[in-house]
Every structure is written in structure tokens, then in C-alpha cells.
Image (cartoon, rainbow, N blue to C red):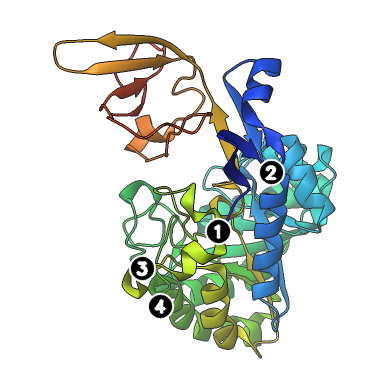
Amino acid sequence: MHGFSYKNGSLFCEDVELSALAEEHGTPLYVYSAGTIVDHYRRLDKALDGVDHEVAYAVKANSNLSVLRLLANDGAGFDIVSGGELFRVIKAGGDPAHCTFAGVGKTREEIVYALEQGIYSFNVESEEELRYLNEVAGELGMIAPAAVRVNPNVDAKTHKYISTGKSENKFGVDFTAIEELYERASKELPNIKLRGLQMHIGSQLTSIAPFVEAVEKVKPLVLALKEKHGIEFWSIGGGIGIIYKESLDSASVDWWENQPLEERPLTIARYGEELVPRLKGMGLKILLEPGRLIVGNAGVLLTKCLYEKRGSAKTFKIVDAGMNDLIRPALYEGHHEIVPLSEPPTGERFKVDVVGPICESGDFFCQ
């Protein structure tokens, strides 16, 4: 669901005509639907009713200060992967005490900054990082709250660049090594408070099955860590996919309900229905780390066609936005629906490549 639709032949974001914004501000221009962002956050928050939980928005999905401020004002927590993201969250009014710090390459400067700001937890990716965190915290005379990221070796069946929960991925500690690591840490690392356990198996998941498999596999481990080490939260990550094709049509709730059952996209409601019963009664706070789900279809990139170039093999539409503005198509041929600001008339259609002005052949939006 989203806030973009044609009205009287012109494309609108909620009640604002996009062509008027392009004329006033120029292009390339990003425009976001505040109503869509808040609606997605609130529906996901509501879907987890029945368990103690917090929705921690993944800042890497969109770190625009206005987007962060919107979510902070609605009570969201934040999942960050750099000191810069933490700085932006604070600048937007977010509370560091509701921030978790993920990522495999945290620097000393970032660790010090996060400790000084009082974040909720570091999501640690390796034993070496955990020991380094203990060292830095000790030098500051502080205790660092931490959760180790477990790699459950669950295939999310998504693009290989955004799969993060398999044994060959660079993320997390092997499932079978977690209990021994927590035991060593509790004895050898006096400046670490083991506050929880974290996992995230991948992004753009359009089936509930990998989520269920990961939760059912890791749940006994979480309960064992709670009993032995008193952990207080379990972050089950993010990863719910969104609709990229037919994205304008998917604005209506009816569109989702009318899809054939075997093709029906994973919805927020289905996610909650399947996971809440499996998470109830654990006596832990459940953290979620959605990003794409919250903002992925809540914005548009407005761009203007500068030239049409007819070659012997292809016709090109050259626009003023480039891969520096939207990297997904160039990075892994990610699909984004391209639509005109004025509703197109019916009639003959032509295939063209939509490309940007950058001097690389990879600078394209569709081919």
C-alpha cells in the first residue's frame, strides 16, 4: 500500500501533484509519502501485538533526516550500521537508548561514540569484535551492552548479494558456536553485558517460510541463553520484501487480496499471524529491524528526459538522474517501475532503454 496514484491524468503523492514539485524544485528530485511511511510502521507494530516488542527502523534503508524524524516522533527505535547513522538519528530526535548498532566493521571511533551516547546494544558479528568491544569499554571505564549475531544457516532464497543467514555469508557467528562464546564472554570479558541475541537472514524475502524456519531453529538457543545468562531481548531482524513490479497497482488493499493464493505477496498481517504465536511466552523483548518494508515504496525519484537517441540496435531515453541517485538497477539489476507524471494514452508502445548521464554503460534504470 502506498500514497501514489493518478488523479485527473496527473500523478500525485497523497494530495500533492508531482509535476508541480518538479517544476518548483527541479530534477532529479526525491519525494516521499509521509502517510505511507507512518502507515507501514504502525501496521507492523500492530501486527506484533501480543508480544513485548520494538520496531527498530533500519536506517540504511533511507537516512533522510525528515524520514528519521517522522519515525522518531511515532516512537520507533533504530537499527544503525555506522557512527554517522547514529549521529543522524540523534539529530532527527531519535533516542540512542532505542538504537542497536549492527555491522561487521565497526571502528574504534564509532564504538566510543556509541558508548558515550548510551545506545541500547551493539550487535556483534564475531568473537574478535566482542573482545575488542570489551577492550574499548574497559579503557573508558564503561560496560558495553552487546548481543552476538547468530548465523542460523537458513537459506532466505533471495538475491545472493542480500542473503545474510547462510554459513558462507560474512555475517554472524555460527549457530553451533554461540553457547560456548557466551560462556567464555561471561567469564573473560568483564566490560561486556550480554543483553540479547540477534539474527537477520536476508532482505527482500517474499515467503514466510524462511522466517518461520529461522525462528523455530533459533528459539531453543535463545531460551537457553536466557536461562544461563539472563539475556533480555531477541532481535529477529528484518527482511520482509516489497512489490517492485506493478507497484502503482499495489496501492489498494484490494490488489493484495485479489492475487492468486500461490502468487500473493507476503503481507504484514501474515508475518504477524505466523510469528506471534511462536514468540509468545518467552519472557523476552522481541526486536524487529525493518527497512525496505517501511520506505521502499514510499518514495519516487522524479527525473526529466533530456534526449531521445535512436541507435541501430536500441532507442535510448537519456534522463537527468543517474546511478548515483539510484544504484539498485546498476548494482544488481534491481527492478523499479518507471511511469510518466501524466497518465499515458493508450496506443502503440515502444521498447527503450532508460539511461542516465554518467559515463559508464552500467548507468541505466531499465534495459
Q: CA distance from mark 1 to mark 2?
A: 13 Å
Residue 276 shows which numbered tag? none
Q: Give the label, 4 or 2, closer to the camera.
A: 2
Q: Earlier in the sequence, mark 4 or mark 2?
A: 2
| Residue 195, quarter of picture | bottom right
- Of the numbered discs 1 and 2, the one sitting upstream in the chain is 2
Q: Nearer the viewer, residue 145 or 319?
A: 319
**Residue indicated by mark 4:** 213
Spatial CA span between label 2 and label 3: 42 Å
Number of the front mark, 1 or 4: 1
| Foreground tag (4 vs 3) | 4
Few, some or many residues within 10 Å of mark 2 (<14, 14–19, 20+): some
The residue at the point 36 percent across, 68 percent down is 153
Task: Residue under label 1, please give it.
Answer: 252
Q: Earlier in the sequence, mark 1 or mark 4?
A: 4
In the depicted structure, whether residue 190 falls above or below residue 347: below
Frontmost of labels 1 and 3 is 1
Q: Are marks 4 and 2 in contact (CB under 8 Å)?
A: no
Of pointers 2 and 3, the one earlier in the residue sequence: 2
Tell me which amino acid carries mark 1.
Ser
Q: Residue at x 49, y 47 (%)?
A: 248
| First in residue order: circle 1 vs circle 3 | 3
- Near mark 1 (Cα within 10 A), the count class, few <14, some 14-19 or many ≥20, is few
Q: Position of residue 32 (x, y in %)?
A: 66, 38
Residue in the foreground of this view, choosing between 317 and 100? 317
Label 2: which residue? 14
